Image (cartoon, coloured by chain):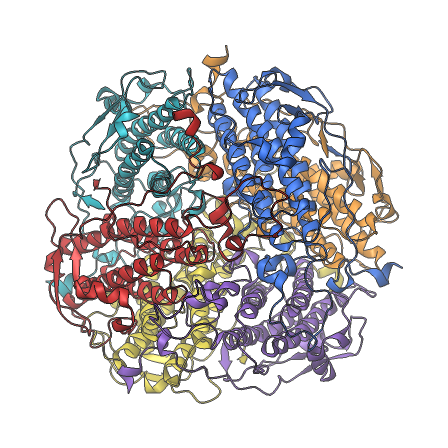
Chain colours: A yellow, B purple, C blue, D orange, E cyan, F red
């Protein structure tokens, strides 16, 4: 069973609204290599696990637990990027000569139609998240290799998305996730190492220079690329695998630690003009 | 952030394998009104919430937390129904004259191809779970009404699935979920009641006679239709709504309680012939 | 605007339930060459029509109007095939030893889960109807050729579905639709003839012997393969095209006539055990 | 069976082309809460209806009939917004230095590729309409609640789309549909009222101020929010439900009336350069 | 079996990057009437062919072989349009104040996220290619008519896409494909002619004036609209059909010829900042 | 450009029809890890390749070329399994009392509806092939790792499908493909070895005992698990990678060889009752 404290795993850095950034950041939430995919993939691999070598299940499940918090972090980041973007007055016919609002033109129109400027279970192209992207092969090596590819591609795509806007809300979340995807890449690569693979200089994929990403460097200084946060309230054998030397070129010792201190969930203002929540008259 | 104890929210009742039952039970996991939908819908509605009336967010989030455990419960139930079903020896050409295995004929072939007889993020018809089924309208009344429909249809479909097999593993999980969906229906109906709706004799939907479902009756006797389990490690305002008289015909007082004692996660045996996990030689 | 009389375009022939037949007949409703596709394709081609040569629009719209009635006919046929099929008593745990009901095994489980044994907007494989199958090319010749292929494939597939069950409810509807698809094939082939094509002995596609289908022969004797029913309450130029000799090998003169006398919409019984409609206690 | 008069249910107000507005208006046609969904949902609920309480079926069917006309209205509105937008001369290589046309950049490229600047069965994000969005639960209360959510969300989304452009063609159609969705919300809310629900001040959802939408006010003055148009050529029991006081805060008596006088279907010009219809040389 | 020489079927004309053109050109690759569809449709029709009249299979297969080369041509064209577009320096936070890159705004963000500025199996709207668009009806006339529609719509859509940018890389490939789609339209129309159809002045569809497309005229001068390239290393009966007078208004004799001399596959530069290929340190 | 000789890459072993086997074998054609996926994935990775290290491109392209032949092999195998299955006489109303044909019940109904008992671009569950399953990450290590997972899962799933029927047509094709997927797994694992990875005893995945699969053993004896067939008509640098010791436990030297001698493409009989091809009267 799953327990919760209302705290985000990282800070939502304030900055101006940026609906075009919100649009592309959806990839990190509902894309093929986004947090919904990692969350569900590790959920299925955990429940479908067979046999007694539960140190592997505990590793997969440990990453799963963090991914639920990542989903929440990206949802909140997207909401922050959308908040106060675009037009604000309803029924303004005749007072606005522009054929279409700029925010809508370069953002995702569904962000303005479906909810009150809020996150959706879709990717950067607007395609809904799809269960066929979740892989639980029933073979531990295939599952671990697939997870390595998933985390590697996660970093790869996030470094590309990072270039698309210099908005601080956007880049802070991406920087944090890049470093954590790196740690999860280490986790699955290390698990394969315990099964006999020597990765040489293969990892991290992609071969990025952390010094170019100031937001990442901060988290690397905290050692976040080499730790696994432990969200278990009971015992876990994750440390049997996530220990010793990192399987990546960047080296350093792996260790299991408590999660970061939590960060506040931003409170979004009422938007009566968007009918959100739309209950003012009733309650007060 | 999300914390975990390796305990299921209900028991996995042992019985014989039943792959055809596993096939239809997928609806309760990856169908439009299954647990993945409820989990993700309440996740998005929680993060996308606006304004200060957080008793509503705490209610939605409270149900969300339980749904993560429901996903895990149904995954484990499907795995139990598939375990030891079908053929067992690989490469048996020439020793088996049947054109196709009975288990595969009436089950879902993907259960036998994708993983080692294990759960998938699909519905009873084999369609992958789809993000377009998640609704977060950005209007509290529309969201609550949608959630009432979701939980009502959840019960409705589960009572129909229940008829399809008398397998005990299958019916025990369905019975538990029917009662819990009823409690969640009460939660969202009650929230609308606090906004001024008087439901009369409308609920529960469907209008079922609990005496006909022995598995349900047991949980009703425990009062599970009128309680909301609390998975929060911090404060929650859920009790501001989930209190007083039930909005349903079945009446009784609503209350917030700790979750059930946990139940063990079944350990599935290694299946070397399915290459699951397939690491025997390496580790030992 | 669209007006309605509660009458079906053909009879629902009574016979025993046959859920496996209902499953495959879904192809004629929600399949790529089913009635929902023809209805929506001609709806879009009608509204998107350009220019003054409105005899072509009136032809396309005329077929569109009939397809709405075809959708209704197939929905009712599927409902009749499902009615009283499968299990009937809810909550019967312990009294039924069969692992899965026969009806569910060879039918579509969604017929028993989604509604109360009723039709769905899906195909014979359970895939939901999809808007990407609707073609409105914006070029009259391409549109007409596409419509010829659509109606030809409609007949072709229905003659294959016809073989799958000898149920009378099933075959009566298929027989009627085969003959009507033939008439619509004639309509679009004739429209291309007015633009200069000489079809030789190409049509009908497929090259079927009507004498082998007793249900069809009856409608051919009524001349239904060479008439276009007129559902317009105002003037239409459809007769400028749908006239003269049939473009098919089967020859005969084309003519526009009033629709068939209507047939009653069957009244399906309440199914309290399926919670359908489930309002008995409230209303009376 | 369905009969037709070539008249639109509302006027197509002329204004300049606006392909970006056409793109977002697709949501009202092929989106999850658009007119194709309402049309097909009520079509399935009508045919799948069980039992003798046909006043409910007549209500659902009555709304279905109007939705067919709404589909036609939105198709024509989109076509008007696209007509004469974008580039006009084919094969103009070398005479145009711009890398991409402005109309295409902010419109939906499929509007310019698939047909000759015309409507498509897709949503504002370009996703094709999907049958899995149609709900016919086989339980009258669940169906009616679902319909209330559908119509409420229909209004909600249209008020958001309305903000995106001040184009008159665009806003006139949206204003009309907002008021009619409101009437349909009243219809389904009233049906639940006859089953015992007292809605208090819940409706309309969203809680919008009609005075802010000049296009809407006009139709409210005509009473369109409290009438149900009757498209039946035979008897209907719709008036047994749609009568008495409105279930919404805005009050007023409900009544069944004849449809509005019809409006002309605009004739779109030939576009030889788009090969639409492309038959000039052949016919004349 | 399939053999290969690393040569493109047409030249990649150099010009500036144009990511918005790359976005819309995806329709010709992964759209419903794009080269992946033609390739797979003719692949299935070839393998599923029945009977002894193999001249028809050889015709279909002959076109299939060319389509594999068309897929490769469009992939390379899209890559050329994307190459060196957009931002180039990774991790440039703080040095770039723009909220979103222009290339991303008007291009497809997936082009910049999924790969290193490279082609994808999607259409101009970002929808993934879908197998349900492939038709192999099992009736030769229906298959040939479907292929005629496919090739006609292929030309029609490409003439519309052509207008969207004057980029030379873009238009050269489109011009070549328009002429080749025309030849394939002739191939299938001719096959139907051998079965008795007289097309009159129907073809080509659309009725375009080749003189307006300078890129096309060049290929028409080479006779490419009336030849079928032969990629068979063994005997083929294609010439039994593809011979004699063209079935189109543009007339001329049909003939089978060797493929064009090949053109070099452009070498795209390493993009270390996109981590593509990302192996520099390892290999050298 | 691509050249062709009408020869299959392996024999179609004759046996009785087995439509249920045809249904599950579709996974190897149109499933997520089937031959259409491998073909398209390597096609995109080949065209999207960047930089001068073309030995990697030649390796990927070399496997791509073989996959086109695999697609053709599986299409033909499915057709053989369907040929002469099920009912044969059209229009036999009244002479057949069975409610549904056995072949249809346990096969895929689309095999009997869509074409004349022939292959489709779908998976074992009937879902259409989808372009979102194709990965071309633009990072060579990520691409190679993804390809290793793809080929490993390909073997894994085929060993599971193999158990489902002892039909010889079915198992011969599966046995051949299992061995070839193994060779391709070696190819991509070896490519990663040249970049520094030491795989230890990881491969092959799954860890299967070849002696249990008589059909496989035959191809292993021919050395097919350690060779790469060369379909290039020009030079290729594939041998720079595919050489030396196998990266798998099963060891042996890797080498590049000519393709197998070809096997005849079976000629399927005309099926006039299925209207396939349906042109008899016209041609003769």
Question: Taking C152 as reference, is F14 above or below it?
Answer: below
Question: Taking B131 as reference, is A175 above or below it?
Answer: below
Image quadrant where one finds the N terminus of chain F: top left
The answer to whether A28 appears left or right of F235 in the picture is right
The answer to whether E37 appears left or right of D46 in the picture is left
Foreground pick, D208 / B271: B271
* Residue F193 image point, x, y percent: 17, 68
Question: Taking D27 as reference, is D274 above or below it?
Answer: above
The answer to whether A236 appears left or right of C17 in the picture is left
Corner quadrant of residue D257: top right
Foreground pick, D265 / F249: F249
Residue lying at the far bottom in this picture: please name it. Answer: A235
- At a point 43% along the width and 56% down the height, the residue shown is F18
- At a point 73% along the width and 82% down the height, the residue shown is B223
Foreground pick, D79 / A277: D79
* Residue A266 image point, x, y percent: 53, 68
* Residue F189 image point, x, y percent: 21, 66
Q: Is residue D153 visible?
A: yes
Corner quadrant of residue E11: top left
Image quadrant where one finds the C terminus of chain F: top left
Foreground pick, D210 / D82: D82
Residue lying at the far top in this picture: please name it. Answer: D284
* Residue E84 image point, x, y percent: 24, 46
Q: Is residue D75 visible?
A: no
- At a point 30% along the width and 51% down the height, the residue shown is F73
Residue lying at the far front in this picture: please name it. Answer: F95
Count the marks: 0
């Amino acid at each position: 069973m799953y327990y919760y404290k209302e705290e985000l795993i990282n800070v939502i850095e304030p900055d101006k609204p940026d609906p075009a950034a919100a649009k592309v950041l959806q990839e990190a939430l509902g894309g093929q290599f986004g947090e919904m995919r990692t969350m569900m993939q590790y959920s299925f691999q955990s429940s479908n696990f067979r046999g007694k070598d539960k140190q592997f299940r505990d590793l997969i499940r440990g990453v799963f637990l963090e991914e639920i918090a990542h989903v929440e972090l990206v949802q909140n980041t997207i909401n922050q990027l959308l908040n106060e973007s675009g037009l604000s007055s309803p029924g303004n016919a005749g007072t606005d000569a522009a054929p279409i609002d700029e925010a809508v033109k370069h953002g995702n129109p569904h962000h303005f139609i479906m909810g009150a400027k809020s996150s959706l279970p879709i990717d950067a192209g607007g395609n809904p998240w799809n269960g066929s992207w979740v892989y639980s092969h029933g073979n531990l090596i295939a599952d671990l290799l697939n997870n390595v590819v998933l985390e590697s591609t996660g970093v790869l795509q996030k470094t590309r998305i990072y270039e698309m806007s210099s908005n601080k809300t956007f880049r802070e979340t991406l920087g944090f996730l890049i470093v954590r995807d790196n740690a999860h890449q280490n986790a699955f690569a290390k698990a394969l190492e315990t099964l006999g693979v020597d990765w040489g200089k293969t990892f991290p994929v992609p071969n990025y220079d952390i010094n170019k990403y100031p937001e990442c460097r901060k988290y690397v200084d905290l050692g976040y690329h080499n730790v696994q946060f432990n969200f278990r309230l009971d015992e876990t054998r994750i440390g049997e695998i996530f220990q010793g030397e990192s399987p990546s070129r960047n080296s350093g010792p792996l260790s299991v630690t408590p999660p970061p201190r939590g960060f506040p969930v931003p409170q979004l203002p009422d938007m009566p003009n968007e009918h959100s929540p739309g209950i003012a008259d009733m309650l007060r």
